[in-house]
Image (cartoon, grey):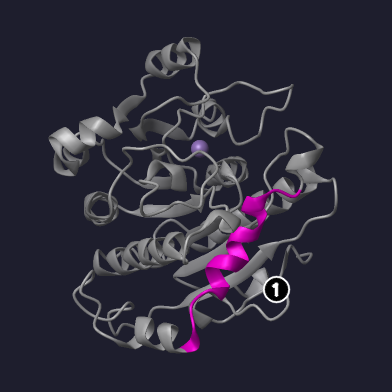
């Protein structure tokens, strides 16, 4: 297979120092971390955008000592060490290659990498990039030949058909998902404030059958009742950082009060793993230049560790049943 990914930028370590694996033909891991830095730009000034910096920022910020602690110490979020002392393999595939002003090529490479990961049975952990990068990943789920429930965390609906004729940008991932036959139910959680949607997009989402759960519903009714209403898996989890409260994830371009709080997002991650296999997750829309003392990156890393740790504890490691 042609080389589709490249190592993180100069001097940047792999995610939590897990082995860097650029040869996809040799992929035999339980979890594969992948950077997809570039969304589909709406204009010249979007390429590159601040979110392109996020995959390497997420890899780079922790110190060697922090990482050693994360890998070896008892994690009270998980009830034991991250990998539960099991022979679980996590690899970092690096970042999807890109050529200046060729966003379509970047998406094609991203889709091909994601497809290879899903076909290998590994769980894919994508580091965005803006929310456009979810589109090639969702397209790759087609390789599994099974329908998947999409869980979407976001302040915004992301149902725009196009912006300036661009159909695969960060305002459109859930509209595009709704057109994919392998995407079954869609649950959108965390909506609030003034977003990109107009009434027509809200109508389209509801007509399609999306469950739309506002952040205030989560605050008033609790995440347990939201989880109870989520249909059966398997699941794909797409997390736009602006779905989470800007008090704990300020490094987003659309800071909106009233977002999901850490205990709620942690409960969602653990609760979803308990309900069924989560074939992959992405964390998108982090704009590192807007961070305050790394607080966004700290929560992001904790979120990914909770995802990997809860998946392992629920037995969702490499899926050889569906290979
Ligand atoms: Mn979004």
Would you say residue 60 sits in the magenta stretch?
yes
Residue 220 vertical placement versus 297 (above, below): above
150 lies left or right of 232: right
Dominant SS type (magenta): helix
Q: Is residue 270 left or right of residue 18?
A: left
Is residue 270 positioned above or below 243 on the image?
below
Camera-side residue: 280 or 257? 257
Where does residue 237 sit, x and y in percent of width and height?
A: 41, 47
**Quadrant of res 188:** top left
**Nearest the eye: 199 or 306:** 199
| Residue 240 visible somewhere in the drawing | no
The x, y position of residue 124, in whole percent, is: 49, 59
Question: Is label 1 within 8 A of ligand 1 (CB to nearest ligand atom)?
Answer: no
Q: Give how far across and how far down residue 159 sits, in percent.
A: 52, 24
Please tell me how many numbered marks the rendered image carries. Answer: 1
Q: Residue at x 84, y 54 (%)?
A: 99
Residue drawn at 21 percent across, 41 percent down: 227
Q: Residue 282 colored magenta?
A: no
Height in image: 213 above or below 154?
above
Q: Quadrant of residue 202?
A: top left
Q: Which residue is mark 1?
A: 7
Q: In terms of depth relative to the viewer, which is nearer, 15 or 61?
A: 61
* Residue at image coords 55%, 34%: 173
Residue at x 46%, y 66% (from the top left corner): 293
**Which percent across, then down, holds residue 181?**
50, 29
Q: Is residue 66 visible?
A: yes
Magenta stretch: give its range. 48-64
- Callout 1 secondary element: loop
| Quadrant housing the N terminus | bottom right
Mark 1 nearby-residue class (10 Å; few <14, some 14–19, many ≥20): many
């Amino acid at each position: 297979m042609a080389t589709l990914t490249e190592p993180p930028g100069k001097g940047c370590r792999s995610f939590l120092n897990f082995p860097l694996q650029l040869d996809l033909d040799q992929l035999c891991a339980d979890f594969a971390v992948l950077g997809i830095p570039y969304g589909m730009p709406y204009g010249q000034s979007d390429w590159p955008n601040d979110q392109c910096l996020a995959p390497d920022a997420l890899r780079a910020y922790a110190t060697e000592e922090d990482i050693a602690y994360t890998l070896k110490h008892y994690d009270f979020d998980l009830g034991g060490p991250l990998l539960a002392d099991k022979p679980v393999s996590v690899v970092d595939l690096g970042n999807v290659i890109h050529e200046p002003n060729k966003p379509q090529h970047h998406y094609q490479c991203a889709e091909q990498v994601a497809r290879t990961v899903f076909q290998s049975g590994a769980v894919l952990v994508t580091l965005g990039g803006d929310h456009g990068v979810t589109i090639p990943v969702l397209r790759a789920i087609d390789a599994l030949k099974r329908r998947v429930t999409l869980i979407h965390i976001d302040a915004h609906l992301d149902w725009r058909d196009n912006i300036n004729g661009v159909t695969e940008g960060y305002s459109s991932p859930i509209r595009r998902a709704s057109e994919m036959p392998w995407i079954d139910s869609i649950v959108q959680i965390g909506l609030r404030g003034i977003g990109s949607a107009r009434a027509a997009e809200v109508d389209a989402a509801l007509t399609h059958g999306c469950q739309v759960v506002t952040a205030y519903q989560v605050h008033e009714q609790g995440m347990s009742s939201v989880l109870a209403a989520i249909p059966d898996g398997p699941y794909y989890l797409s997390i736009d950082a602006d779905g989470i409260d800007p008090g704990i994830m300020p490094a987003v371009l659309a800071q909106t009060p009233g977002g999901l709080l850490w205990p709620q997002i942690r409960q969602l991650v653990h609760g979803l793993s308990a309900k069924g296999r989560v074939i992959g997750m992405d964390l998108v829309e982090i704009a590192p230049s807007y961070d305050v003392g790394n607080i966004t990156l700290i929560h992001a890393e904790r979120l990914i560790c909770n995802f990997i740790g809860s998946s392992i504890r629920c037995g969702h490691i490499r899926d050889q049943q569906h290979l």
